[in-house]
Image: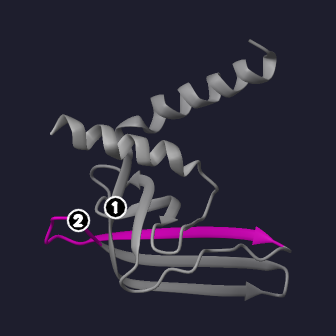
Amino acid sequence: MSLKERLSKYYTESYIKKYGDRMAQIQGTVISAKVEEKTILWIFHKVTATLIVRPERSKAVIKCVYNKNRWFKKPQFIQVNQGHNVMIQGLKGKKGKENREIIQIMNVLNLTTKKDLIPVDHSQIKKAKQQVMRTK
């Protein structure tokens, strides 16, 4: 293993050790999508996206929030509309905190338009879905 691979493996393992119990992945239909963009003095840009998602085969709804702050360059968020089928990867809130029901978005895969916030290999995701279907 090269040094770069070792560092990558170390960071991955430490991230999973720290946040492993809070990781969540939700797939469902978007009920509501709200994206707010704010600029402070033409220098500091903020994007806050709030998605309310109804998971497949469920009556419950889940609130998901994406926050991104950036200097000079405007952060981007993908186009998500009501009725789109999405897969959200993120972190659940900490237990005992007021936002424990909210999921902090790390990545959004819009399965309707085939776009994603952070590029991911979609063939890996499809294989994971098929394996789950075979075990049932």
- Compare residues 74 and 128 and report the one nearer the observer: 128
Residue sitting at 35 percent across and 83 percent down? 83
Residue sitting at 35 percent across and 38 percent down? 21
Kind of element beneath mark 1: strand
Residue sitting at 74 percent across and 12 percent down? 1
Q: Quadrant of residue 103?
A: bottom left
- Compare residues 44 and 52 and report the one nearer the observer: 52
Name the colouring of the figure. Answer: one colour
Which x, y percent locates residue 12?
Answer: 58, 30
User: How far apart in space, not on screen, are marks 1 and 2 (Cα)?
Assistant: 7 Å
Q: Alpha-carbon neighbours of circle 1 within 10 Å: few (<14), some, or many (≥20)? A: some
* In this rendering, position of residue 131 left or right of residue 135: right
* In this rendering, position of residue 31 left or right of residue 10: left
Q: Identity of the amino acid at label 2? A: Glu
- Compare residues 64 and 131 and report the one nearer the observer: 131
Q: Are marks 1 and 2 in contact (CB under 8 Å)?
A: yes
The magenta span reads 54-71
- Which mark is first along the chain, 2 or 1? 1
Q: Is residue 125 above or below residue 131?
A: below
Which x, y percent locates residue 22?
Answer: 37, 44
Q: Which residue is mark 1?
A: 27
Task: Please tell me the numbered disc located at residue 56.
Answer: 2
Q: Quadrant of residue 9?
A: top right
Q: Alpha-carbon neighbours of circle 2 within 10 Å: few (<14), some, or many (≥20)? A: few
Q: Identity of the amino acid at label 1? A: Gln
Which x, y percent locates residue 34?
Answer: 47, 86
Kind of element beneath mark 2: loop
